Image: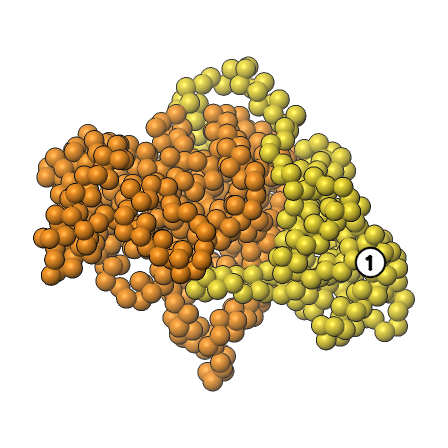
């Protein structure tokens, strides 16, 4: 996928000025934060499950080569095929080849971020194969010619009236006088449009939330059921997954499932958790006749053993972006590549290079909320700091920023000191910014305020303002929640 | 070959040797012992409470449910549901003998279809392998008895589950799959289903009935 990460600052500026986007982004905290907290609080073992999930993923990464070998053996034994792809181009070529051999004209697709990562749709289309996104959010953005702005809610940047306009523009065979004011009618229309496409597709491609070495199984987790229709109706099922999706056993899978849906959408379980092993068996009346797994590396094997290895624990739940004040402010597209939010700020430089994505690790307030909700306890702020240090060492930052950053780095690794200093700075800046309501430069945070253009603080820091806002919200709704970690400093 | 290049790169990054027997033993051990992790206490209950928790959780995920005392009553429960939802007396069923025993086929008022769904069924009937009380989850698997298309294509999915097949957690049910199919073996598709299909992709508003069934009705027998 084409990247605009190098122009992150401009992207962020534009996002802050985009009124429609800002309206849509209001749905992020509304939709996710309270739901996750409620369902996490309702399970006494939740924190222990997070520890267990972290340990399972860490153990697996240390033995990744061996678990992948065991997994491959099992897939082959159950009648499936495994293809190893070193790069995005390799994966695209493998998938195109499978489609051609299946004489495919259309291919339905379940939600897959890896498919975005390798730019699959454009490649298929350029070769005469029609890719059909079937997840409602993906269907909407495919129609708009956009990319997902969130890893589990791809169309979160789109408002309902925009969806209505898109449906009217594209579904021209339907009655123009039809009523689409209610979200339910939009959903029903998409369901009707896609049903025929599910039944007509020659190939179905899904991602995988997990791969299980014990049984050679791929696992998808969805709420809509589109991933299932994608994989059981066509003759050929292709699973596109990155290497680190593997877990050892079905029991390990159960641990991760308990934290995944809770962290992602605040559900105890997503509606459909589907375990697929090989093609259909003799005697099965339905299911695919061919089963292919494409395992993508694309830079991940080099992250093993490095200071960024922990990032490979990520189970793509989206909690870190759902809780990130920077994501709330600028949305997902500003990050400029496939993966937004805190996880993207760490992963993107690893996969496309710090020369292109060096701005992303700066897109942080170091409030620590991402780490405090990450189900596999990835120390995201620490990893972002690692990138900053690397960027600094490589002299990629302009000299002014470099000087500022070394002070910043000292402070940022000492959160209390940092808060104290920024609070003092904010107080004095409030005086400077008065009348304008915004400030464009904050000493000690050069590269950051360059794009943030935050409202001038009225004598308080972001942390303090946040704590106040949370408190006000609590009083209004009578919620008993405590503020985020680190708030109130 | 990409495969060997990728594996070699992983080993280089990890600083390990492919011949390292200790690592291999560790992996083999985990794959055969399949240790359990943290299993929530909420599902560790005596049978009666377990079934009650399952029913509560089923309702909490917007499915409807009814409990009947015997298989004979399941037939009435199926017909009651069709009537209550204003549906024609028409239903698609797989080859599961437990469902055949309900006698829907012999009933002149009911039109029954068999085999996989072609996408035009309003209602389908399946028998679950089991249920998981901790989250109100059903488990079904592929095969002629209960074709997988029946789980996803109809508007209304009715699922019968024996009270005796309801367990507290996923792990216990997966142990039963291992027992039934052999260690490391699986049916083609195993579906954990928790409520009817839904989407929140439009402005984070939760709507039921995305691509899968709009309604899920669970009949617990026993
Ligand atoms: S980094 Fe953690 S919180 Fe973010 S998507 Fe990955 S697993 Fe979820």
Task: Please name the colour scheme applied to the rendered image.
Answer: by chain
Mark 1 highlights which residue? Answer: B68
> Is residue A245 among what the camera can see?
yes
Residue A299 occupies quadrant: top left
Q: Residue A442 at x, y = what percent? A: 15, 46
Is B19 or B24 nearer to us in this picture?
A: B24
Question: Residue B95, relative to residue B109: is it above or below?
Answer: above
Q: Chain of mark 1?
A: B
Q: Residues within 10 Å of mark 1 (few under 14, many from 20)?
A: some
Residue B96 percent location from the top left of the image: 81, 53
Tell me the yellow chain.
Answer: B
Q: Is residue B61 above or below residue A58?
A: below
Q: Give the secondary structure at mark 1.
A: strand
Q: Nearer the viewer, residue B188 or A433?
A: A433
Is B119 displayed left or right of A417 in the figure?
A: right
Q: Residue at x 70, y 59 (%)?
A: B150
């Amino acid at each position: 996928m084409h990247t605009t990460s190098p122009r992150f600052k401009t992207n962020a500026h534009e996002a802050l000025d985009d009124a429609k986007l800002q309206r849509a982004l209001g749905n992020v905290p509304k939709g996710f934060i309270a739901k996750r907290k409620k369902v996490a609080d309702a399970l006494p073992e939740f924190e222990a499950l997070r520890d267990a999930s972290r340990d399972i993923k860490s153990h697996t990464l240390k033995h990744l080569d061996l678990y992948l070998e065991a997994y491959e053996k099992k897939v082959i034994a159950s009648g499936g095929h495994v293809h190893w792809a070193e790069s995005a181009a390799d994966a695209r070529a493998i998938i195109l080849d499978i489609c051609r051999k299946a004489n495919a004209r259309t291919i339905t697709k379940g939600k897959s971020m890896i498919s975005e990562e390798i730019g699959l749709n454009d490649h298929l289309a350029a070769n005469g194969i029609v890719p059909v996104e079937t997840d409602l959010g993906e269907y909407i953005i495919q129609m708009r010619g956009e990319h997902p702005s969130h890893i589990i809610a791809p169309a979160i940047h789109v408002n309902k009236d925009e969806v209505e306009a898109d449906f009217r523009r594209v579904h021209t065979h339907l009655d123009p006088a039809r009523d689409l004011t209610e979200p339910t009618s939009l959903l029903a229309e998409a369901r009707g449009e896609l049903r025929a496409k599910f039944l007509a597709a020659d190939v179905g491609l899904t991602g995988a939330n997990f791969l299980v070495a014990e049984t050679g199984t791929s696992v998808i987790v969805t709420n809509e059921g589109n991933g299932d229709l994608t994989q059981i109706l066509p003759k050929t099922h292709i699973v596109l997954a990155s290497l680190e999706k593997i877990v050892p056993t079905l029991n390990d899978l159960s641990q991760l499932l308990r934290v995944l849906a809770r962290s992602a959408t605040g559900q105890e379980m997503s509606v459909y958790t589907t375990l697929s092993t090989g093609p259909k068996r003799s005697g099965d009346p339905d299911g695919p006749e061919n089963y292919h797994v494409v395992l993508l590396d694309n830079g991940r094997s080099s992250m093993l053993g490095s200071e960024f290895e922990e990032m490979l624990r990520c189970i793509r739940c989206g909690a870190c972006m759902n809780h990130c004040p920077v994501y709330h402010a600028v949305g997902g597209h500003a990050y400029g590549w496939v993966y937004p939010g805190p996880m993207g700020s760490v992963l993107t430089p690893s996969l496309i290079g710090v020369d292109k994505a060096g701005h992303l690790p700066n897109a942080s307030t170091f409030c620590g909320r991402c780490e405090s909700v990450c189900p596999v306890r990835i120390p995201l702020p620490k990893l972002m700091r690692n990138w900053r240090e690397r960027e600094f060492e490589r002299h990629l930052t302009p000299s002014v920023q470099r000087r500022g950053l070394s002070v910043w780095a000292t402070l940022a690794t000492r959160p209390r000191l940092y808060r104290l200093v920024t609070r003092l700075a904010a107080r004095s800046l409030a005086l400077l910014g008065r009348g304008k309501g915004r400030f464009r430069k904050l000493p000690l945070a050069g590269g950051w305020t360059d794009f943030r253009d935050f409202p001038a603080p009225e004598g308080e820091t972001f942390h303090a303002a946040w704590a106040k806002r949370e408190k006000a919200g609590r009083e209004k709704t009578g919620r008993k929640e405590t503020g985020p970690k680190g708030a109130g400093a | 070959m990409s495969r060997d290049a990728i594996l070699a790169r992983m080993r280089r990054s990890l600083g390990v040797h492919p011949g390292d027997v200790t690592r291999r033993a560790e992996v083999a051990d985990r794959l055969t012992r399949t240790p359990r992790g943290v299993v929530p206490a909420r599902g560790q209950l005596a049978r009666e409470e377990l079934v009650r928790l399952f029913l509560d959780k089923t309702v909490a995920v917007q499915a409807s449910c009814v409990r009947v005392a015997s298989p004979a009553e399941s037939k009435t429960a199926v017909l009651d549901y069709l009537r209550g939802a204003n549906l024609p007396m028409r239903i698609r069923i797989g080859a599961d003998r437990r469902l055949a025993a309900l006698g829907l086929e012999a009933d002149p008022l009911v039109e029954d279809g068999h085999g996989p769904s072609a996408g035009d069924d309003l209602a389908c009937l399946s028998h679950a392998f089991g249920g998981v009380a901790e989250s109100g989850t059903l488990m079904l698997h592929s095969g002629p008895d209960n074709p997988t298309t029946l789980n996803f294509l109809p508007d209304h999915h009715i699922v019968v589950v024996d009270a005796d097949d309801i367990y507290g957690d996923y792990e216990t049910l997966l142990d039963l799959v291992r027992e039934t199919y052999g260690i490391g073996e699986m049916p083609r598709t195993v579906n954990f289903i928790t409520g009817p299909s839904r989407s929140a992709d439009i402005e984070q508003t939760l709507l039921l009935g995305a691509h899968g069934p709009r309604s899920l009705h669970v009949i617990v027998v026993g």
